[in-house]
Image: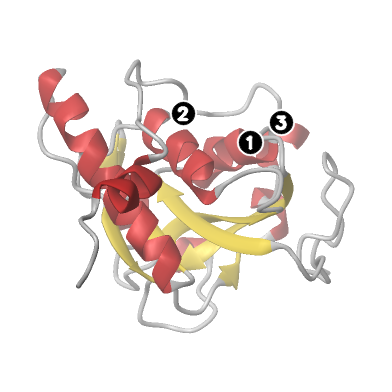
Amino acid sequence: MSVKTHPVLHRPIEGPVPDAARTAFFGMGCFWGAERLFWQTPGVWTTSVGYMGGNTDDPTYEEVCTGLTGHAEVVKVVYDPEQVAYEQLLKVFFENHDPTQGMRQGNDIGSQYRSVIFTTTPEQREEAEAVKRAFEPVVRKAGLRPITTSIVPAGPYWLAEDYHQQYLHHNPNGYCNHGPNGLSCPVGVVQAQVEVEPPRR
């Protein structure tokens, strides 16, 4: 039986959700710590963890860990856009892992741990690309390599096994490699770009 209710936010993790809610997907290494970052973010309605971006249907954790299915571990974030902007979620994403490591995150090595943003609308893709471009010079100034985060359209989302859901709530001392990376990710960059665009004739 699948987990039905988020034990922290006390809302369903699989729906239904409010009509005004929007959905975002982020892969930033092990999804345990990543999910906690987002459920602690004001304006987030519910979260869950699962698999996305692979080439098989309904994979198991063991199959994903082989690297053969191509899936990433991701957090599904359902949020109220009136309370938290998508750019603020991007800020949480970029500031709480190392987006320069390619197919790994720290000691977690494999394609399932890659840094990736799965977008659900053209507007999300535009914002994600803009924030990534704005963050790149911050990262390079810190002496790090180029950002390897990929930004791709969301495909099927496969809910992970029950024991992964809200793992750090159930296991407060469990493994977590997420936290502030010491860099400040600019936000408001999309609106700023719009404002400086010359008027079209």
Mark nearer the viewer, 3 or 1: 1
Query: Does the rendering let one see residue 110?
Result: no
| Residue highlighted by disc 1 | 36
Q: Amino acid at mark 2?
A: His
- Give the image location of residue 175, x and y in percent: 54, 29
**Few, some or many residues within 10 Å of mark 3 (<14, 14–19, 20+):** few
- Choose between 197 and 78: the one closer to the eye: 197
**Horizontal side, residue 95 vs residue 199: left or right:** right
Q: Residue 165 vs residue 17: left or right?
A: left
Instruction: Tell me which numbered mark, 2 or 3, is placed earlier along the sequence.
Output: 3
- Residue 164: percent from the left, percent from the top? 64, 50
Which residue is labeled 3 in the image? 171
The reply to whether the C-beta atoms of the residues labelled 2 and 1 are less than 8 Å apart is yes
Q: Position of residue 113 (x, y in %)?
A: 35, 49
Q: Give the residue displayed 25% in from the left and 35% down from the top.
A: 135
The residue that label 2 is drawn on is: 178
* Near-viewer residue (64 or 132): 132
Q: CA distance from mark 2 to mark 1?
A: 9 Å
- Height in image: 122 above or below 89? below
Disc 1 residue type (three-letter): Arg
